[in-house]
Image (tube, rainbow, N blue to C red):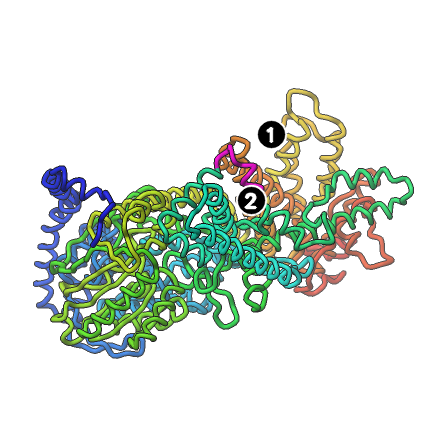
Amino acid sequence: MHFEGVDLPFAKAQREGFTQPLSMLSFILKKFAGRHHRKYIEKCRPIVARINEFEQQYQQLTEEQLRAKTEEFRARVKGGETLDQILPEAFAAVKNAARRMCGRSFTVCDHELVWEMVHFDVQLIGGMTLHEGRIAEMATGEGKTLVATLPLYLNALTGKNTQLVTVNDYLARRDSEWMGHLYNFLGISVGCIQQQMHSEQRREMYGRDITYGTASEFGFDYLRDNGMATRKENQVQRDHFYCIVDEIDSILVDEARTPLIISGPAPIEREQPFTRLKPGVEQLVAAQLKLINHLVKDASDLLEKPALTPDERQIAAMKLLQVKLGMPKNKQLLRLQENPEWRKLLDKTDVEMHSDFNKTELYKYKEELFFVIDEKNHQADLTEVGRKKLRPDDPDAFVLPDLASLFIDIEKDTTKSPEEKEQAKRDAQNRYEVVSEDIHALSQLLRAYSIYERDVEYVVQEGKVVIVDENTGRIMSGRRWSDGLHQAVEAKENVTIERETRTYATVTIQNYFRMYEKLAGMTGTAETEATEFNEIYRLAVTQIPTNKPGIRVDLNDSIFKTRRDKYNAVVKQIQEAQARGQPVLVGTVTVEQSEVLSRMLKRANVIHTVLNAKFHQQEAEIVTRAGQRGAVTIATNMAGRGTDIKLGEGVRELGGLFVVGTERHESRRIDRQLRGRCSRQGDPGQTKFFLSLEDDLMRLFLQGNLASKIMEGSMQEGEELEHKWLNYSIESAQKKVEQQNFSIRKRLLQYDDVLNKQREVIYGIRNAALHSDRPKDIIFEMIEEEIASRLEAANYGGKGDANATNLEALVGWLNSHFPVSAKVDELTGDLETLLKALVERIRKAYALKESVEDQAALGGLERYIVINAIDHHWQEHLTEMEELRRSIGLRSYGQKDPLSEYKGEAFRFFEELMNNVRLQICTSLFRSATNRDAFENLFAILSRSARMQGPAAAPTALGAAAASAAPAGEAPAAAAPEITLPAVTIRRETPKVGRNDPCPCGSGKKFKNCHGA
């Protein structure tokens, strides 16, 4: 280690003699840290003793007697005993069942496994933690899968569905089959939700006592039940009572960033422009690359001159800045930045040029490029040079037409006929849409080519672009980037470009899991996110002690100047470990890193296995073998969670599994997860991280701090820095990033909470309609709200007199939607009395409609009216809310809080949504029928009624609907020619009423003598 020229904090502390006080302070802080966890553990000890006493007693029972305990517990719960009162006996029953199963073989995922597990005392404490709705932090290998059986069994005694969420389908199946043998031994049914299951299977699985599955499967079932199902028989979930989330930090923190979305293809208006625009963007990116390489070479030549003048130094700095703006990950630029003097020069120039004083000059330098990249915000913007290169023959290609001005000019043109003016307006509108779409598509293609890298942000599998989660390294099947970005990447990779989608239903992971009455979780790493779990989910984190003391050795990080040096050191470390026979698990942050390292190991003739997003299906199998003697496994940091790595024969003596990290993650939690892959159940193990000053964490978040200090010193290529104080500095940077990411997630959740409240209202109305035999009450509630709204709009019952024109419009609306023959002079009395009178008239008209309808199908028709109105407008509302969410940030430029603005706009959007739903229900009520004959019979009755009233009667909804539905050449008697309404969709389900048949109205008379007269 060489620290010449580097005044690191620990060196200063040693010189000034503060080592002992610092150690004392650290000792005191550690003494108090975790005190609340220890108090909780001590509180649980007496209950553990009682559980073990009961378990000793149960050893005297026969298997039938033990199984009968389940029904006894259920009866006691029904009788009023609480789960807490039954807990010691229930936990004892589960533990005793596990003891009886020891030595028996069971089939799990087509493999024979011997049961050899009995709950330890710490696992009993973990079970209590989960039952109380807390997060149990238990180290890897402490048996979290077995721990979950205790609270799941206890809570299943209520008769409600209890659930366990895992990170993937394989673990859900494995755990449900493995632990299912224990549940079945006790007479408890267990199910598992898997992808591609049809509704009947899913309903059966949710009908069982305990259900295993992934967060996405549970979430999508919720959306299908509440946003897609058209009958209650189509719904599969029972209730949201109790849920344990395995690897809760991964699911509720990492995966929660992406909402669950059920979508379908959006309506096609014109062919997508990505394929047409792709060649131009490819040429533009190639031209930028050529320009950047030229700038880098010029800068390098200048900087390497023996006698560099200040002016030449400044010119070189500006060229480097242009390279950073145009391609920040350019390999030659990264190489130049390895020189501390040049890196410092670039950093200083960057800061100076981004000040307000130099904005004009910076703009001039940007305009010499074809496009500019904002790496942190994942944006790419064309410059004027870039725009001219893309559209040299069309200077207005990137200018949106001013439709308002164009329409005014068209109207002023006296030479055009009205038809020609309309055509001109349509042409202008079409041009606006084409230009708008082209600008947007070019922007997304530019991002796809310049920012989104294959095998880093995404992989290509089976001809499809699949997103890779930036935190977990897992592929996110079925997820797509929005706003055309995914189509742009598909065009770049020459795979089939799928249609843009439209959201049908959506919910965030956070809001889905907040619906449960009782939520719990377990993981090996939750303490660093304890604040987030408490603030968002109201979940406390409890650290459960290990069954055996942990003896893992965490070595200090090794820091190198370049990535090349770092990877060489990693390969050397792997070769040394393999020579000893010690197994090595190498954790990488990205797929690209794992493949680079794999190529280096192949060149070094090191036999190894690669596990990354491309080989997700074999994840558990590959990780299981990672503890065998001499094994080398490369995996993304999150790979293999939930799968134990058992040490092979003789590996303990070699020091156990050696875990190597090739880069520190932005989150300490991900690093802790990687470290936790070794040293399970008291096994030995070692961990070590290798870093370079080119790593993203060091480059983006330690700029001007630790990195600059080290580089200003005498650090040479190939040299290694290692000290615990460096570890602290890196962890402090990670804490800052964690806080920043938490703030972002919290802010996003505040936005989604607005939509979540709206979702609860809509799904509440929808479910009420689904579960009602006759949703007539919901329909009339909507009708009453709509009429009340229209009376208020007409100023009826207000301070001033109601406007006569408004009242006439109201009457016209009433008569065009309902067969009530209302008149303006009938609108008398106070608002409430008039509202009741109008609704009553509509009820009477509807009673008449009911009398001629097929009674068996009437409930289904009413349900269809409500659900169709909700679904159509809710889907449009979701699209509008997405657009609002994307654009609302611009309000900050007007010194306004985007969140407050979003809440206000969202409220107005929701009011409009409910207005549209009510209006569609009003429009559909008398324009829908269970069959054609019912409609014809009702129309005949109303026609006769209209003739009795005379010609003064106002036109009605049925007359208007019949007029539009009548065959050509026929004119129904009460038709109102000035009203044009949608055609009626009707189907024949019952025989036509004959003239001599009893009248459907129930009078007992023949139809020809009653309503058929």
In the image, is 724 to the left or to the right of 191?
Answer: left
Q: Which residue lies furthest to the right in this view?
A: 415
Question: Mark 1 to mark 2: distance in Å?
Answer: 70 Å
Res 502 → quadrant: bottom right
Q: Measured from the top left, where is residue 994 in percent x and y?
A: 74, 62
User: Amino acid under label 1?
Assistant: Glu
Residue position for label 2: 365
**Residue displayed at 56% across by 69% down:** 495
**Residue displayed at 40% across by 66% down:** 613
Residue position for label 1: 832
- The kind of secondary structure element at disc 2 is helix
- The kind of secondary structure element at disc 1 is helix
Dot placed on the residue nearer the N-terminal end, 1 or 2? 2
520 vs 235, nearest the viewer: 520
- Can residue 959 be seen at all in this image of the molecule? no
112 vs 83, nearest the viewer: 112
Is 361 magenta? The answer is: yes
